[in-house]
Amino acid sequence: MTTQSDTSCLEYDDDAAIAFIMKRLPDNLKSVIDEDDVQYLLDVMYEYYETNNFLDEETDETVEIAEEDLLQYILVTAKKDGMDVAKFTAENIQVLLDIEYEYSKSLGVY
């Protein structure tokens, strides 16, 4: 996944992202994942991006985000934070990340 690190022109909105993701959840996840889970996922994603300096507004450089690293970071963080492991499986997280990617792509982030 490649993104521009200059986020100053982006109009990413957590509430809109959550609504977008919830609307597109597969039926089998609609009874498992709620809006709080999606907000948690977004928070951990931002934490990962900040930790890796992907949100540096001082540069126009394109950054390469290793999707597997992001997935593993979310899995480890969710476990450490005591999140429900039945919800935060690798498969469920990947579905959420894929839908979030579609939201970001619709904004021109990718």
Image (tube, rainbow, N blue to C red):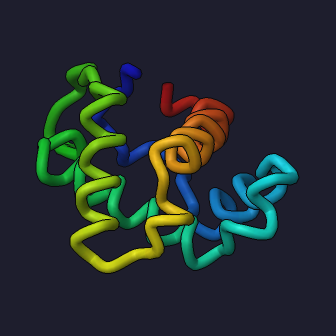
Residue 33 placement (x, y as % from top left): 67, 67
Of residues 60 and 32, the one nearer the viewer is 32
Residue 70 placement (x, y as % from top left): 30, 40
Of residues 57 and 33, the one nearer the viewer is 33
In the figure, 60 relative to 48: above or below?
Answer: above
Residue 42 placement (x, y as % from top left): 45, 60
Of residues 55 and 25, the one nearer the viewer is 25
Residue 92 falls left or right of residue 30? left
Most distant residue in the front direction: 86
Residue 55 falls left or right of residue 24? left
Residue 74 placement (x, y as % from top left): 33, 53
* Circle count: 0
Image quadrant occupied by the N terminus: top left
Which residue is located at x 36 percent, y 47 percent? 8
Which residue is located at x 44 percent, y 66 percent? 85
Residue 76 falls left or right of residue 39? left
Which residue is located at x 33 percent, y 61 percent? 44
In the figure, 110 relative to 82: above or below?
Answer: above
Quadrant of res 95: top right
In the figure, 32 relative to 10: above or below?
Answer: below
In the figure, 109 relative to 9: above or below?
Answer: above
